[in-house]
Amino acid sequence: MLDKENINENEQKEEVNEVREDNNTAQDEAVIEQSTEDIVVREEKADEKPQKADKANFFVRLIGNLMDQTIVLAVAVVLYFIFSKGLPLAGYMIIEDTASKLGIFFIMYVISNVLLTSIIESTKLGTTFGKKLLRIK
């Protein structure tokens, strides 16, 4: 009689385990399905962002470039003052002529423009500050 009870108990445990396995399988499938849906939604959102960036019109790009050029201009001014204060320390002097000062400033501006844009675009940002702020690609 004990053997029959043990067999019945084992059968009941097996049935409970099968039901649990079925529930676990159903839960796993639900989790996988939800994860798949989340991935699809994320991919759709990722696909939408470049489309918005591509639609930037002329004026938005103009404003982004003006922002970038303002930053470059500020860097050029700083470089010019460093250069103009550093030359006398080395025993040289900038001629007090307006044309030569503008020429040196123009050289600093071109150097700043080329280097700053190249350096910023090669960093993790991947784009300049103005384009990043306006979300232009």
Image (tube, helix red, strand yellow):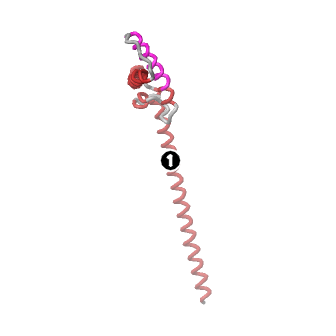
Majority secondary structure of magenta residues:
helix
Residue 86 in the image, given as x and y percentages of width and height: 42, 24
What residue sits 50% from the left and 29% below the top?
119
Residue 74 in the image, given as x and y percentages of width and height: 38, 24
Within 10 Å of disc 1 (Cα), the crowding (few <14, some 14-19, many 20+) is few
Q: Is residue 113 magenta?
A: yes
Q: Is residue 47 magenta?
A: no
Q: Which residues are magenta?
A: 98-115
Residue 85 in the image, given as x and y percentages of width and height: 39, 23
User: In the displayed structure, does residue 80 sit left or right of residue 3?
Assistant: left
Instruction: Determine if residue 57 is in view.
Output: no
Compare residues 36 and 46 and report the one nearer the observer. Answer: 46
Under tag 1, what secondary structure?
helix
Q: Which residue is mark 1?
A: 37
What residue sits 44% from the left and 20% below the top?
91
Instruction: Determine if residue 59 is in view.
Output: yes
What residue sits 59% from the left and 84% below the top?
6
Q: Residue furthest bottom?
A: 1
Q: How many marks?
A: 1
Compare residues 95 and 98 and report the one nearer the observer. Answer: 95
In the picture, residue 1 is in which quadrant? bottom right
Residue 50 in the image, given as x and y percentages of width and height: 48, 32
Task: Look at label 1 and name its amino acid.
Answer: Glu
Residue 47 against residue 23 in the figure, above or below: above
Residue 101 against residue 24 in the figure, above or below: above
